[in-house]
Image (cartoon, grey):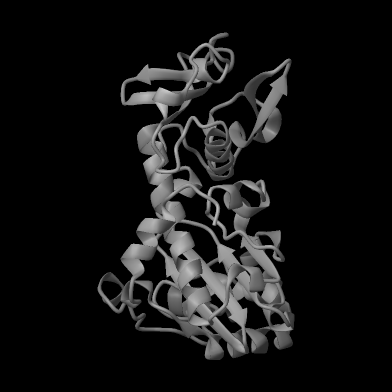
């Protein structure tokens, strides 16, 4: 009820220690105890607390940005003796949902796309999770694909396919086709038969114009959150010492691609770090260490929750952040 309307305040922030019988955990030792890390506020939940513990946010002496990318992107910025947090309603595009050939980062997903040049001819190559049959594309593959298509001019900075500027006689140009939803870029046509023995017809793996728009909405939401937190502390991207990407998404991401298309800010000094499943790792640390648990509670108490929708100029920042340009 309360999370469905502004200001999205959770009724309960910290439940303390609970007995398994209180919530029906029948597979757990009845004499055991369990707990949740507290919610910071709104849609900034306990995930980002786990990430902060795993990444040692309190030990960072220079400005540090943490982004846990997902349908609800959680962002934390530490600097100037303050700790700001916000949530960005990125939508599920970066997790492969609402993308025509999207899927989670599992076997058969294209997770990385890059440009190849041979004898003066450009084309794409890609990595597939599990090195098995290609089934679709996951979030990290989507980001690197958009970055490649921006580099060669097939997608403009507004996100639109630049058909008037494409040479259709080239290898890259021939990948642009007219599909059921308009112009599509073909990654894999499956022209050599079904994906695996016994399977039926397999649709080609393509990127549509609608896919790009879904991506831009997600990308814009996250970047707008980053920009607002930086402005709250009167910092620029060049002041950052590190940008930490959490989750399975961050573990597979080409670190240059999100900067080239403006998902992450361009910084002269910041190191981009993939932290993997940092929320899970932080939860383990809190479970095994009283010091880590106390530190999590300290971070929870000092963290300042920023509601993006209430910030002046948010809509303008969001609209500007949707452009596919480095800045």
Q: Which corner quadrant of the image does residue 293 belong to?
A: bottom right
Residue 101 picture location, percent across and down: 45, 32
Closer to the camera in the image, 129 or 304: 304
Residue 112 picture location, percent across and down: 64, 37
User: Is residue 228 positioned above or below 80 on the image?
Assistant: above
Q: Is residue 158 left or right of residue 122?
A: left
Residue 28 picture location, percent across and down: 58, 70
**Rendered-image quadrant of the N terminus:** bottom left
Q: Is residue 313 left or right of residue 220?
A: left
User: Is residue 14 positioned above or below 153 on the image?
Assistant: below
Residue plotted at (38% across, 45% down): 214
Residue plotted at (31% across, 73% down): 3
Residue plotted at (61% across, 23% down): 133
Closer to the camera in the image, 302 or 13: 302
Does residue 98 appear anywhere in the picture? Answer: no
User: Is residue 210 positioned above or below 250 on the image?
Assistant: above
User: Is residue 237 positioned above or below 155 on the image?
Assistant: below
Does residue 88 appear anywhere in the picture? Answer: yes
């Amino acid at each position: 009820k309360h999370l469905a309307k502004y200001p999205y305040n959770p009724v309960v922030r910290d439940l303390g220690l609970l007995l398994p019988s209180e919530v029906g955990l029948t597979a757990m030792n009845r004499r055991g105890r369990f707990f949740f890390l507290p919610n910071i506020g709104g849609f900034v939940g306990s995930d980002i607390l786990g990430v902060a513990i795993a990444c040692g946010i309190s030990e960072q002496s220079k400005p540090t940005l943490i982004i846990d990318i997902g349908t609800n992107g959680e962002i934390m910025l530490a600097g100037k003796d303050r700790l700001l947090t916000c949530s960005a309603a990125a939508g599920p595009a970066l997790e492969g949902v609402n993308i025509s050939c999207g899927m989670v980062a599992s076997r058969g997903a294209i997770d990385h796309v890059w440009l190849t040049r041979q004898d003066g001819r450009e084309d794409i190559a890609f990595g597939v999770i599990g090195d098995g049959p290609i089934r679709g594309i996951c979030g990290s593959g989507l980001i690197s694909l958009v970055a490649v298509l921006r580099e060669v001019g097939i997608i403009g900075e507004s996100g639109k396919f630049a058909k008037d500027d494409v040479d259709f006689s080239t290898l890259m140009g021939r990948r642009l086709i007219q599909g059921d939803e308009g112009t599509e870029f073909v990654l894999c046509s499956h022209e050599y038969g079904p994906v695996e023995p016994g399977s039926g017809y397999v649709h080609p793996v393509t990127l549509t114009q609608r896919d790009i728009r879904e991506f831009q909405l997600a990308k814009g939401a996250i970047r707008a959150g980053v920009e607002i937190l930086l402005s709250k502390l009167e910092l620029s991207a060049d002041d950052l010492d590190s940008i930490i990407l959490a989750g399975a998404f961050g573990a597979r991401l080409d670190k240059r691609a999100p900067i080239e298309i403006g998902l992450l800010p361009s910084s002269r000094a910041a190191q981009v770090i993939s932290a993997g499943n940092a929320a899970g790792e932080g939860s383990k640390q809190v479970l095994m260490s009283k010091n880590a648990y106390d530190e999590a509670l300290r971070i929870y108490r000092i963290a300042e929750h920023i509601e993006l929708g209430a910030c002046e100029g948010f809509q303008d920042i969001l609209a500007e952040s949707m452009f596919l340009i480095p800045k």
